[in-house]
Image (tube, rainbow, N blue to C red):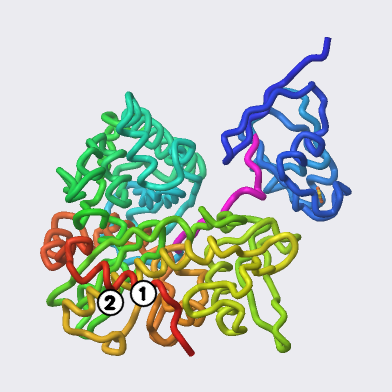
Amino acid sequence: MTELVTLQLQPLARRLTVPRGAPLQEVLFPLGVEFPCGGRGRCRGCRVRVRAGELPVTAEDLRLLGPERVAEGWRLACQARALGDLVLGLAQWEAPILGDETPVAVTPRPGLGVAVDLGTTTVVAQLLDLTSGRVLAVRSALNAQARHGADIMSRIEFALADAGRARLTGLIREQVGGLLTELLAAAPGAGSLTEVVLVGNTVMHHLFCGLSVAPLAHHPFEPEDDGLKVFAGAELGWTFAAAAQVCFLPCLGGFVGSDILAGILATGLHRSERPAMLVDLGTNGEIVVGTRDRLLCASTAAGPAFEGARITQGMRAATGAIHAVRLLAGGAWAVSVLGGGEPRGICGSGLVDAVACGLEAGRIQPSGRLPGGDALKLAEPVALTQADIRELQLAKGAIAAGIELLLMRLGLRAEDLDRVWLAGAFGNYISRASARRIGLLPFPPEQVEPAGNTALRGAKLVLCGAAGPDRALPEVRARVEHVALKEDPRFQDAYVAAMGFPVR
Ligand code: FES
């Protein structure tokens, strides 16, 4: 009888049973994993990371990946066989995760601290030496809750059913605890963990802190308790750091969380004499605008198009995604694919570029219509449909209308802004010219600055004492007014108007 072994594949939470000794190439290829050099051990494109179990090291592993990566568990799938039960991370399905290398000022004190950016999709954690502010190690992962829904609305839905909330709270506390353990293992002898600062959107805040998300599911979508939460590590089940103080920073209101509060601290928007803006583009777009005297913040439901969801061939910004499109002389397209191989789909930044090029080339009308109704072919086998363009119009219309209304409330015009910072991964990779061409961001590209992972940087500022929770946070929070855009009678008209594309 054939002996069987079990393979668990991350980040897709797939579990397979295969014959012992089966070549991984035969097992993984039908699931969409590509073998760019045909499995000849020449390209590294098929690498996987062993998270549990054993995969013997081959000469090709050492030659192509190097001893350091091999020691971290990386192997070439094309050279490996499933000899026992395994948990494997697939590099091709991993999205690039944005860290932060900016040095921050520190008020020195003994011990180690960890800053955590707890996103709906990804979690990034940095270990810092609190005597110097030096980053000792970084770990990131896809949010373990993602198997119960990709966006915050589906997480809320899951949390409201049966024991869903306890499950999501348990999963994320356990995952962050696991990342902390890995970080501490990466810096042996550096000291003991004394403090952890987390930031995240309102839903992540509530789920981590064990609060009910029910108030976020219906009008007026205001959290019951959005304040600073402080735990001892022991309360979270972190026996390895039982006495560490764990702070989840407070939200700003509605769906504007402490990731945006951290973004204000990181960009210095709360000290700006001239009007400036911070925009975080995502399923839920968040906007903060104003000066050091008065700041307005709002969130606007953009839908998942920027993350490649609900787009026919959409995907996250992972290997195989078209992430940039250029128009060549003569009207042809040039596409850039993450990882350099054949395209598998299109991610948010590619989508924005493709539509900007389509408008420039006259292949998409300002109303969003595709003349003739044919799909817009980008590069075999990837094309955009009429429904895809409508989906982008919904997303960009929500952001553009939010920007317009907040500016209107402050009596400002787009050109009055000194600076527009784009927070987060999508803001880092999107073409500013294309964002302007489709009417997503009505600012000249030179006014706009990708600001990187401002959530993580802000968390580090708080952790290092430059903006400690007891001093700066209440003062900054008091200066930020939350605006419920949906309650503004002008929002619907502004939204509908912003769905069209600018006419050249
Ligand atoms: S497919 Fe190229 S090294 Fe494995």
User: In x, y percent, where is residue 372?
Assistant: 63, 72
Task: Give SS at disc 2.
Answer: helix
- Which amino acid lies under the numbered mark 2 shown in the image of this protein? Glu
User: In x, y percent, where is residue 353?
Assistant: 56, 74
| Nearest to N terminus: mark 2 or mark 1 | 2
Magenta residues span 88-100
Residue occupying image coordinates x 25% and y 41%: 245
Q: Which disc, if any, is residue 404?
A: 2
Residue that mark 1 sits on: 498
Q: Is residue 135 left or right of residue 356?
A: left
**Measured Cα–Cα span from mark 2 to mark 1:** 9 Å
- Check disc 2: other Cα within 10 Å, few if <14, some if 14-19, many if 20+: some
**Is mark 2 in CB contact (under 8 Å) with mark 1?**
yes
Q: Nearer the viewer, residue 41 or 191?
A: 41
Q: Is residue 252 left or right of residue 424?
A: left
Say above or below: 301 vs 167: below
